[in-house]
Amino acid sequence: MGENKQEWDRLLYIIPFLLVVPYLYLTNENSTDYWWLIIASPFIFFFIIAIVGQIWNKHNFWVNNLKEGGVLGLGALSLSLSTSIWMICDYLSDHGHVETGEPLSWLSFDVLTYGDDSWSIATSGFSGIGFGIYLDSLSIMLLFVATFLCFLICWFAIGYMTTDSINDNSNHRFFAEFVLFSMGMFGMVLADNFLWLFIFWEIMGLCSYLLIGFYYWKPSAAYAAKKAFLTTRVGDVFLMIGLLMLYDIYGSLDFAVVFDHPDTGVGGVAVDSAELQTALLMLFIGAVGKSAQFPLHVWLPDAMEGPTPVSALIHAATMVNAGLYLVARMVPFVDIHHHGVAGMEELGLIVAWIGGITAFMAAAIAFVQNDIKKVLAYSTMSQLAYIFTGLGATLWLFNSGKHHAGALVFGGSLFHLFNHAMAKGMLFMASGSVIHEVHHAHDHLHHHGDDDHDFDPQDMRNMGGLASKLPVTATAMMFGSMSIIGIPLIGGFWSKEVIIAKTWYAYFHGAEELIGPALLLLATAGMTGFYMSRMWFMTFAGEPKNQLVDHVHETTPWIKTPLVILSIITAIGGFGLALYGMVDWLSGEENHLSIHKATFLKQVIYELDHAFLPDDLKLRYVGWTTIFLSFIIGPVMAARIYGGALKEGEKATPVIHWLTSLSGKFGSQNVDEIANSQLADALQNRLYFDDLYEGILARTIIPFSNFTAWFDRTVIDGVIKQIESNSVLGSVQIRKVTTGSARDYILMAAVGALSIFALIWGVN
Amino acid sequence: MITSDPLTFITISPIALGLALLIIPNIAPPSMADYIRKISRSLSMSLALAIFAITTMLFLGQIGNTDWLNITQGTYVFENEPVILLESIGVRWTVGADALSFPMIWLTAMLIPISMLVEWDAKKGHIFHPLILIMEGALLGVFVVLDLFVFYVFWELTLIPMFFLILIWGGNDRRYASMKFFIYTFTASVLMLIGILVMYFNTNDPNLAGTLTGHHFDLVSMTMQSSGDGLIASNGLRHFVWILLLVGFATKMPSVPVHTWLPDAHVQAPTAGSMLLAGVMLKMGAYGFIRIAVTIFPESTIIFSSLLIILGMASLVYGAIVCMGQTNLKRMVAYSSVSHMGLIFLGIATMQPLGIAGALFMMFAHGIISPLLFAVAGAFKHHYHTLEIGSMRGIAHHSPWLAGHMMLGWMASLGLPLLAGFVAEVAVMIAFWMTFGWLVLLPALTLIITAVYYLTSMQRTIFEGGDPHVGILPESLHGEEPRDITWHENTGMLILGALTIIFGIMPFIFWDMMSEWSTDFMIETLISAMNSQGVKP
């Protein structure tokens, strides 16, 4: 790579961090004894980077060698990554039988219970809050996603942030908050009880808030940060109520205790399904807020005000998965094959409906967005909603006794989480690369000072034809989009297919209410094909729409490496892991990842057969409809409107070149009439949800609080003042007894004191 | 004396030194007076630090080697040989600490040096710092004495230094605020005094009794008497006394509707005054309520528990809503204290050991967080000369340290996990759900409202402002560029911030003893009352 060699020397600083795990391994230590390294390392470096950065702000070594803390952050994250890879390897080689040690005691307390007509302190059943780790395939998979992506995106961010003059020596703030966020994500994945899950969940919320508001001087960023925090806070409060209910039911919040026998509550009583379902719905509201689902979705598009690495990490690849993780943790409650509680089918249906509505709505809004990051934001919402629908179907299938199908869609949903995280993290980084280079080209063209502030480097209407200028980025974005669309054999195809098929399966087998989500998902598959292709064509294909495209170059160091790594994973990872039985492993049906058929080739044929020619004829139609909509209809429509060959003489890699010229062959269609319609207008305005919420708040809470402030000042305090001024009047009267003689005063005081004493004595 | 009777030492020595530093310069020859004025600040600080060291050693066991987890309710550690003060009416000097009072003692000893540090450059420092020292003695006295007469004396004594702090170093409206503060809380304390006197005339221990009246003020004996036959025979009178005590303590806490002295006092008070007022003085109300009203009259507490819920809920929800309507930073923070103190009543009303432990931890956590909030607000006043929210924007550029402290304090106050306030909130909420079920929606709603007003105020101060090099600065600066906070302000806030984080991650430092004590408190006091009153879940 032609990147500056001096830049690479910075990587030497992270070598000490990388040596820790090999040293521990060679001294025969046990990986699960060192899980705390994963959390402690970023947590400690949060303080170091924040404080040293504030004091050492403009120091040469700090700025140039440590990249304003970025290299330290990368080191801390590399330690987390290597420790978690060590743990994951141990977990996989032991087939999931790992000892995680006793949780530490954190809060211990007693509970008063009522029985036999009297109150007493409970001697058993209720336990305090401990802190330990809980490992299963779900947390292992998310742990890998989190540590791996945090590391890569931190790498990317070093290039992205430190070459941006606007950041003005405040990147230590960025990197400190970045590693604190990582700590939150790692902790949430590892935590072994619901309260610590919630604690780390909130830490992530804080970092999301701080990082969205990184450009604090921009009013729009400040507003977006507040909006994100408050919207998720609404969900979090309900999540907390859910925790209270769960504690009341089970007397503990530990996964190990609760999942052991979810049908038996504290004291051995049978758990009431209605009560448990309410508790789980409360948790689900929290998940809806965090994962930006309808109706708490309004914060995510605005969150794109943050720097692009933040969007990649928090608002696409990791934090927004927290809600999915929480819903996935609900599965043991409904699994009636393993002591789950029967009679909670509605929970699955509600989850699936919320998912279906969000998937469709977000995809529709993504049609009209011109900001490259906003398209990706809506795409994130839509894809997360896919997973929610899959998890909803899982909950329903498990609760109605269809264990096998439930396990399949459970694994498929989690697999989609994995594929989506990899692809979307990369897509955001690629979009960051585009924005960064376009911005630099713009600065280069206009020099500093006299540039027009109206120029928006994120607007795709300023781009076009970038495929030849940014070959790595264009390829990465192509693979990412293909994975999200579900182009056969690439990444997300393997998981999306399972989700759609099994949602329909649930519909065919008794869940009539699921027809809505099932149809919405099918439609969304085609819409995804359209808007993702539209984004790619608008950015990379056709003739440049702005003269500055000629000045765009892929030169910033640190940016390309993560894109290459993730492109490879996205392109072949989905198929590869599908071959190794990722779906069954994630759902807990299998306890190791391996090839099940005799030879590799047989496995390949088996998987392809399963994906394209399932035994169930109805599902075969569903599958082929999905492929037809997402692979043919969506991209072709997009190509007809936005496609176009590159300018004569522009060079690009063969595949990209072929793709762009192919897109040009579909002809061009004028869409002005549709673009100016009322529907497009409504979509532009995000279906007016933001306006609605703001209107309600502005008309109710704000006047009410102003009224209350006035009430407190005038009425409550006013009464006191009234008493006071009356007593002043009274004292004027009383003043008549003030004779001015000390003897009288002493007499009065004595009489008064004596009468008080006598009064109290007499009362007794 | 320090090892044999540490509690007496930490109470009397600051008052003695404080008074000496105030009086001697007025009677000594001029040259010596000047010298004393010069060193008075450092002397005060040294003694405050020494007291902090002593209390920390008490906690760690270097003095007395106490097992803090096994102090049952009704027993005290570091008790002294009682000294008879007024033989005729039975007043004795007797001190002791337990898991209820010790966190408050440590908190006071910790906050005094920090509030001195934050106002290190106060005008007339030779009066200011001795006054704070007297304040320390008075506050510690409230928490350590076990004789209600002396308790009342210290209780009123705290008003005097605070009155002067507001009157001399306060804002423009200081005269009104200090008078209001004094009269308001004094009136409430007199009602409390009447309650204490009624209790006094019902005591019957001949060993402790005064020679003239035949009664005594000893709290330990009163508690024992109340768990036996009951301190006051008549039900009606007992409830009446409980109500009198409640009025006195609720005003101090303060609880809606007797809270309006607090915003005025806070807005006018100097930074150190606000820090101590919010950090320790409000806790006196909660401490006294648990120590006297709940302990001695558990039946009345259970009968009136719905009153506690109403008061607590009103403070919590109403306080938070009023916060949203405030435009003055310090006023907003003051009302947030009202809101948070509501949780203490709620925690007690749950009648769960967890809820009471949560209330105790709330007292402690709020004692760390609210001084940080007021230190931030004070620094605003100091460097921007205004407290209007929104008159300055983008202060993260001009005052990055101040912005950082503000962010931490605000987040801690809105209950962010891993910061001290969260533990208290979650403990009270768990207990609350167990007792009251869906009524939890009101406190939950308050969590959202709290986030709204804190985030909005940050959006309009730390954030925004357009181009960071231009920004929006208040007119009160007259075009000057504001500076970041001074080193002593910064150090004080850093310590408070670090404590907020430490007690958020490791709440068990004090939580364990509070939790053990609460369980024992329930067993000794409330459970039998609940059973006899026929309380049903």
Image (cartoon, grey):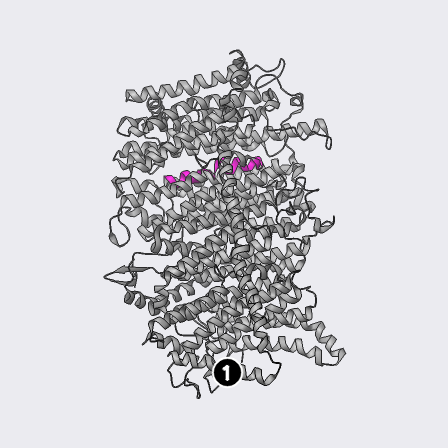
Q: Nearer the viewer, residue B395 or A97?
A: B395
x, y (%) of residue B356?
40, 62
Q: Which residue is painted at 43% across and 55% down in the image?
A: B313
Helix, strand or loop under label 1: helix
- Closer to the camera, A668 or B258? B258
- The residue beneath circle 1 is A751
Residue A217 placement: quadrant: top right
Instruction: Give the letter of the chain under mark 1.
Output: A
Vertical placement of B500 versus A89: above or below?
below
- Which residue lies at the image location 68% right of the left edge and 79% below the top edge? B24
Bounds of the magenta span? A305-327
Q: Where is residue A282 shown, x and y percent of the image? A: 37, 43
Residue B520 showing in the rendered view: no
At x 24%, y 51%, the residue is A269
In reply to whether residue A178 is colored magenta, the answer given is: no
Please, what is the dominant secondary structure of the magenta stretch? helix
Kindly indicate the quadrant of the structure image that contains residue A68: top right
| Amino acid type at image mark 1 | Val
